[in-house]
Amino acid sequence: MQDLTDLYQSVILDHNRRPRNYSVLPTANRVGSGNNPMCGDQMTVYVKLEGDRIADLSFQGSGCAISKASTSLMTVNLKGKTIAEAEAIYAGVHKLVTTGTVAEDDMSDLAALAGVHQFPARIKCATLGWHAALNAAKGDAQPVTTEKPSD
Ligand code: ZN
């Protein structure tokens, strides 16, 4: 498992160093934000919703490597997905970061987040951007905070 852990870390370090879709999205019609006061992570996610499909999305923010890398991975994996598909992907990610179980072969780069389950305090770092994106896509204008019991 040590080799896999190293591999996963390299994906997270890469996304932290070169976050994908890291910009303000001029065409966005939804914005979601989230903060994780336990760690100091703050992420804003911009979503261009077409019907129930996430046509495009981007993010900006500051935070630890896990929060930034997970949000970057989120933008890559949710682009073009319907809200229902996005929720299904997030359900897999949530299982991944809480149990370390890789549910589907096709989770590929998202499997990098499996190591997070070894550090329970970092789970909220990993889920922050996903909550912000899904809340934005579903039209929940409330800023998300990890201090709410919903994880
Ligand atoms: Zn964090």
Image (cartoon, helix red, strand yellow):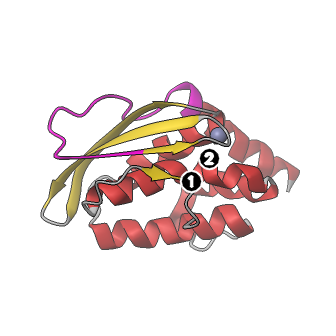
Which residue: 46% across, 31% down? 61
Rendered image: mark on residue 125: 2
Taking the image as shown, residue 100 lies to the left or right of residue 148, namely right
Is the CB of mark 1 within 8 Å of ligand 1? no
Q: Nearer the viewer, residue 54 or 39?
A: 39
Provide the residue designation for mark 1: 146
Vertical relation: 106 (above or below) 12 = below
Rendered image: mark on residue 52: none
Q: Amino acid at mark 1?
A: Thr
Instruction: Give how far across and how far down residue 74 sits, in percent.
Output: 45, 50
Judge the density around disc 1: few (<14), some (14-19), many (≥20) Cα neighbours within 10 Å: some
Taking the image as shown, residue 69 lies to the left or right of residue 96, namely left
> Magenta span has 78?
no
Instruction: Give how far across and how far down residue 3 sits, in percent.
Output: 82, 48
Examine the image and state in which quarter residue 83 appears: bottom left
Is the CB of mark 2 within 8 Å of ligand 1? yes
Examine the image and state in which quarter residue 46 appears: top left
Using the numbered discs, state the Cα–Cα distance from disc 2 to disc 1 in whole angstroms: 9 Å
Vertical relation: 61 (above or below) 93 = above
- Which range of residues does the magenta coloring cover? 15-33
Which residue: 67% across, 38% down? 39
Q: Earlier in the sequence, mark 2 or mark 1?
A: 2
Q: Residue furthest right?
A: 2
